Amino acid sequence: MIRKYLNEIEESFEKQERINDVQSKFNGSVTTNFVRHEDALKIIVNYIRDAK
């Protein structure tokens, strides 16, 4: 009986670890996209400023 509970706990930790990995990858991609948009806006602003 105790082994069953220990196995369930271990499976729960493994599942949470996979969830954390996926969340971390998602957060990384969001940050990358934000930086790309920020860089694009800087280019646009510089282009407009230099055109004046």
Image (cartoon, helix red, strand yellow):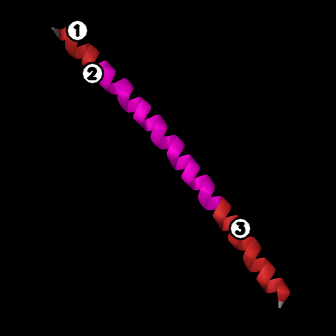
- CB within 8 Å, label 1 to label 2: no
- CB within 8 Å, label 3 to label 2: no
Q: CA distance from mark 1 to mark 3?
A: 55 Å
Give the residue at mark 1. 3
Q: Which residues are magenta?
A: 10-35
Q: Along the horizontal axis of the image, is 2 left or right of 28?
A: left
Dot 2 amino acid type: Ile
- CB within 8 Å, label 1 to label 3: no
Q: Is residue 39 above or below residue 50?
A: above
Give the residue at mark 3. 40
User: Would you say residue 26 sits in the magenta stretch?
Assistant: yes
Dot 1 or dot 3: first in sequence order is 1
Give the residue at mark 2. 9
Q: CA distance from mark 3 to mark 2?
A: 47 Å
The foreground one among 26 and 1 is: 26
Dot 3 amino acid type: Ala
> What is the crowding at mark 3: few (fewer than 14 residues within 10 Å), some, or many (at least 20)?
few
Dot 1 amino acid type: Arg
Q: CA distance from mark 1 to mark 2?
A: 10 Å
Look at 83% across and 91% down and name the residue there.
52
- The image quarter containing residue 49 is bottom right
Q: Along the horizontal axis of the image, is 19 left or right of 33?
A: left
